[in-house]
Image (cartoon, rainbow, N blue to C red):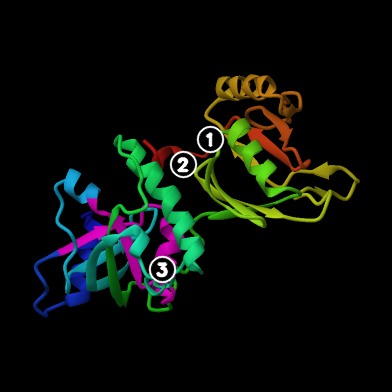
Amino acid sequence: MNQAAKDYWERFWGVEERPEVVSAWMFGESADELAQAVIEGRKTATCSAHVLYEMENESVPVIEEYSIILNSLEEPVAIIKTVEVSVIPMNEVTEEFALAEGDGSYRNWKEIHERYFKRELGKVGLEFTEDMLLVCEKFELVDVKNKSGRMNTRLLRVGTTYIPVSNVERASQWYVEKLDAQLNYEDEDKAILNLADQSFFLVKAKEKETANFFDAYGNERFSLTFEVDGEQALKLLHEDLLERDVKVGEIEKRGHAGINFVFSDMDGNRFDVWSELSPSFKKKNQ
């Protein structure tokens, strides 16, 4: 548990006698979005693979146990208390529990968790099965660090970018094959990808609809710039995208620090790449 979580825990209890056992953790995927769902009361349950508890020699959660929820910056945002725990096969999870997880429907819950568990189990050399045991935990919200109901009164980061596409399946394959994006969810209307430390939603839109815009002089402009760490990294990326048959513009010097180039996806959405990585991102990842 980091110092910020410890301070929050101590301030919450003040002079009262506090429970001896508390843990601090963030959700394994979409940490900020799921933490906010807890704060808003849309998420009152979570589940984990039982085998991972065994492999890591960790104890399964117990009733009356407290947890401090962290956001993606490892900042404490809320306190919850476990009220129910069960270990059951994934294919026996009820619709009631799935809805309590806040994924919208049982189908969404199943598809999202199947992808997640396949990926996580694959990292440790295990195979996913539909009857794998899950630790299913229901909890209640005890406290929100910011009493306004938001995790922080300032904007912390860009969480999701929405990109219009004409065909969700073909577009998601393009992003995975050409940009090494990670596909987390897909249906007829949308796909959810992880790319460049951010969530991208590919949304089915009308033909020829793009995220581009025209400036006051009639030039079509991009709305998003990716960053890489240095000019050599940018040149290598430029070569790699050309080899993958991505529509790529020339490398440019635009009169500011570093160099840039523009590339387009299969629907004509234009993206910029800049060779200067933001200092705050560098510091966070040192």
In the displayed structure image, the side of residue 178 where residue 149 appears, left or right: left
| The N terminus sits in image quarter | bottom left
Q: Where does residue 89 sit, x and y in percent of width and height?
A: 30, 59
Q: Is there a contact, CB below 8 Å, between mark 1 and mark 2? A: yes
State whether residue 154 appears in this view: no
Is-magenta flag for residue 32? yes
In the displayed structure image, the side of residue 86 where residue 197 appears, left or right: right
Rendered view: 1 above or below 240: below
Disc 2: CA contacts within 10 A as few (<14), some (14-19) or many (>=20): few
Which residues fall within the magenta stretch?
Answer: 22-50
Instruction: Give the amino acid type for the residue marked by disc 2 in the picture.
Output: Phe
Residue receiving disc 3: 98
Quadrant location of residue 37?
Answer: bottom left
Quadrant location of residue 136?
Answer: bottom left
Camera-side residue of 255 and 8 = 8
Q: Which mark is residue 277?
A: 1
Element under label 1?
loop
Residue receiving disc 2: 281
